[in-house]
Amino acid sequence: VLLSDGHPCSVQNNMLNATLTSAYYNAMQSGNVVRSQPLQWKDDDDGARECAHLTRRRHFQLCLVSDCLYFQKFHGALAATIGRLLEINGVCVLCQPPRGNSLRNFIALLDYINDEKPLFDVRLLKDYNEDVTKIRKRLEEEQGSKIAPDKIFPVMLILRKKRPYIEREDTMRVVKHMNARSQNKDEKHSPTDESN
């Protein structure tokens, strides 16, 4: 198990959690190892090298990503990182609220990457748990317009990797899409764009 984050304080907290969890597993004699290290998403050669270092023994079967689509300028780097880290048939589960057009824009990026040589199977799950759905509906009825479900209630995006990540080709598609999106956004920029 590898815990990663790009923020130094989060990495430090992850290291403490990894130490505690590993101590628990050792006491249970399970053989599981939990480690932590920094990882910043990058859609360049540095990102490729960092991911190659992480996967030198083997690629990951499962990546869990929590609430990481908020800053849209990092979508391309996140998609490249997921593609580099997962093994073929590996799964990435992203859980986050839609937040305006952020989730939709990330899926559009995945669609663009998948256009010629599909890299991921993509599934979006909105009602993935009956209890969460019931709570969401009850709160929406009770709170009415005071609640913003789009910014509070998580959805799950499931990616299954279909083929190897081709560094030059796939990264070029990521960068091309993000550049086009950035140019388009510059034309229509409004102060609330980054929060959506």
Image (tube, helix red, strand yellow):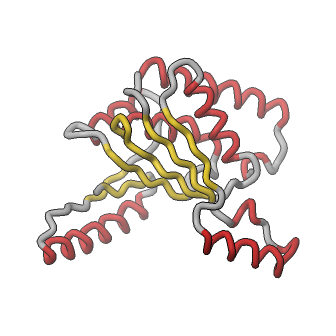
Q: Residue lying farthest front?
A: 130
Which residue is rendered at x = 26% and y = 59% of the image?
35
Residue 118 lies left or right of residue 148; in this view the side is left
Closer-to-camera residue (13/18): 18
Q: Quadrant of the N terminus?
A: bottom left
- Asked which quadrant contains residue 31, the reply is bottom left
Residue 144 lies left or right of residue 113; in this view the side is right
Residue 166: give x, y in percent of width and height.
41, 22
Residue 124 lies left or right of residue 59; in this view the side is right
Residue 149: give x, y in percent of width and height.
75, 65
Q: Residue lying farthest right?
A: 145
Residue 15: give x, y in percent of width and height.
30, 65
Residue 160: give x, y in percent of width and height.
45, 40
Which residue is rendered at x = 78% and y = 46% of the image?
193
Which residue is rendered at x = 70% and y = 30% of the image?
181
Numbered label tally: 0
Q: Residue lying farthest bottom?
A: 142
Residue 146 lies left or right of residue 152; in this view the side is right
Which residue is rendered at x = 42% and y = 63% of the image?
10
- Asked which quadrant contains residue 98, the reply is bottom right
